[in-house]
Image: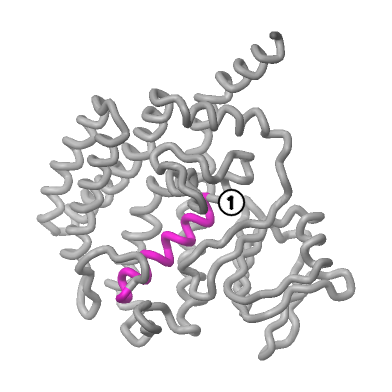
Amino acid sequence: MVINYNQATNGRTMHLVGPGKLFIKSEVLTFQRADTAPFRLNWPTLSKLHLYGDISLTGAAINALFRNRVITVFGSSGGHQYRGHLMSLATETTLLRRWQHLAESDSVMKLKIAKNFVQSKISSELKTARHYQRHGIPIASDLITNHTIRLDRIVRVTSLGQLRGFEGAATAEWFSLMRTILRPPFEFRSRIRRPPPDPVNSMLSLTSTWLLQKAATAILDRGLELNVGFLHEYRPGRPSLACDLMEPLRCEFSEQWTMGLLNQSKLNLADFQLIGHRCTMTGKTFPRVLFWWEKEWREREGQRRLDTSLDPLIANSVAPGHHIAHSSQAT
């Protein structure tokens, strides 16, 4: 299954859903599933490629992706897991990555950067709560009051432990508001990630994974270390900086978007299936929802906002990194 999505600012993003094979035929990148005719991908406009499930790549296809500088993202068949990237190595950003490691080891700088992510996340939830309040949901008033207090107190936080405590309390209250807003037949009792047991948790996990993939792509494209974060500690296998970067956009592109989709009855219970203990979308529903989400991402300029959020992180920090590098060269 092939899902095309044009993004005027960044070329074309394409999503391929396996099982299938990606190969070169007559010098053109081609995708084929067992049940469909071959589909030819257009090189000049292709910039990002998302692969879901069991898709094999020939050596020629991998070489062509590198040669044409196409960022390739790998995900699980249901879209809930981000598995990794295939992209050219940015050796010119070594000094930037060196700074990133130094900043992560500096407790003052680390806390400052982590605060920015948490403040942006809580501000996003606060903005959304005010929207719900204007539309006649009185319980949003409590969250508005408490989030405003949290933003004031975060300025004076002196440790990452305290900061994460504020972030955790804000998230718990935000999910409580979600439970109130969501309409039948869907229910949201608590946030359960692995595995998601119901449609709401499944949608939240799926959209969070899509957002994580966008964040990871932006980070790697700028030459930063994906696994070295500030709010999220380093843990083998976790893209900690991507987890940091997505937090300010999580409310809008995962939680609020999910509630809107379900409350508008664009999906129903028949669009989901339970496989073991995991709730996932049916095969026919997945590409439809993915298309809607990509459309929302483009219309709300998600990529531009994600890229812009990296600017202060780099701008506030590149100078110290170069200073360290130049000083060491001088000695």
- Magenta-colored stretch includes residue 113: no
Residue 222 locus on image (x, y percent)? 62, 40
Task: Tell me residue 324's x, y (percent).
Answer: 60, 17
Report the magenta stretch's main SS: helix
The N terminus sits in image quarter: bottom right
Image height check: is 190 above or below 251? below
247 left or right of 228 in image: left
Q: Is residue 44 left or right of residue 151?
A: right
Q: Name the secondary structure under disc 1.
A: helix
x and y, in percent, of residue 129 in the image? 22, 51
Answer few, some or many: residues within 10 Å of disc 1's Cα (few below 14, many 20 plus, some between 14 and 19): many
- Quadrant where the image shows the C terminus: top right
Q: Nearer the viewer, residue 244 or 311?
A: 244
Residue most extreme to the front = 236
Residue 314 quadrant: top right
Residue projecting furthest to the bottom = 35
In the rendered view, does 61 fall on the left or right side of 94?
A: right
Q: Amino acid at mark 1?
A: Thr
Asked if 158 appears above or below 205 in the picture, the reply is above
Residue span colored magenta: 197-215
Residue 200 among magenta residues:
yes
Is 28 or 278 nearer to us in this picture? 278
Q: Residue at x 46, y 47 (%)?
A: 235
Residue 96 in the image: state x and y as whole percent. 61, 30
Residue bearing the label numbered 1: 217
Residue lying at 34% horizontally and 79% vertically, measured from the top left: 277
Q: Residue at x 33, y 44 (%)?
A: 121
